[in-house]
Image (cartoon, rainbow, N blue to C red):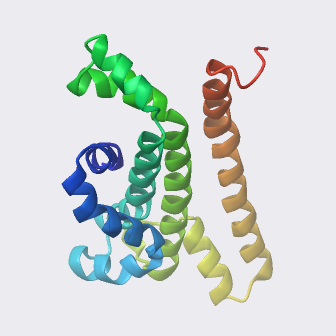
Amino acid sequence: IGTPLGLLVARVRFVRAAIGPILSGLQSLPSVAWVPPAVIWLGLNDKMMFAVILLGAVPSIANGLVSGVDQVPPLFLRAGRTLGATGLKGTWHIVMPAALPGYLAGLKQGWAFSWRSLMAAEIIASSPDLGVGLGQLLENGRNTSSMSTVFFAILLILIVGIAIDLLIFSPLERSVLRSRGLLPRS
């Protein structure tokens, strides 16, 4: 959702004027604020969790892509048009590869925001139907005043965050930097 939205905002001037400030505002809005309306609208179920996660991730991904597209050198676009890469072809072969560092940063930030959104939703909205996630484990530790459970939940949340960064985002970032000659080939 964030990718097509980001491309639309980046490439269509009136869409940027209309939606760009809203996207920035949504990115700065704490995702925990979406939990109460999501519970009211959707109930205590997986749909509510997915909605909160999406509302946490989409603005960051879209804004990252907009930022990446804004940094594409105009020369690339002109060269692409000269070679026949216009419309979707130009977007796929010129704009997206050139915007990749910003897009990747937006994806990484979107993941972090969605992870925080999930933890907040699990802490605030608990239900037997949802099961016990790490956020719920953290909340259960607080409710029982079990410092060991709280720190165990924090440690697990941290491990997941580090693992996602080391296994997914760091290799992607290195690959992009290497392909641009910014890291030595190993």
Residue 97, quarter of the rendered image: top left
Give the camera-side residue of 174 and 79.
79
Residue at the location (51% across, 74% down)? Answer: 120
Residue at the location (61% across, 36% down)? Answer: 168
Question: Is residue 26 at all visible to an observer of this figure?
Answer: yes
Residue 164, quarter of the rendered image: top right
Which residue is outermost to the top?
A: 83
In this image, 157 relative to 101: left or right?
right
Tell me: residue 52, above or below residue 62.
Answer: below
Tell me: residue 9, above or below residue 115.
Answer: above
Question: Is residue 132 at all visible to an observer of this figure?
Answer: no
Give the camera-side residue of 174 and 82.
82
Residue 175, position in %: x, y?
63, 24
Tell me: residue 103, above or below residue 144.
Answer: above
Residue 95, position in %: x, y?
38, 30
Give the camera-side residue of 116 and 179.
179
In this image, 115 relative to 183: left or right?
left
Residue at the location (34% across, 18% down)? Answer: 80
Residue 30, position in %: x, y?
48, 76
Residue 139, position in %: x, y?
60, 80
In this image, 13 relative to 162: left or right?
left
Quadrant holding the C terminus: top right
In this image, 77 relative to 117: left or right?
left
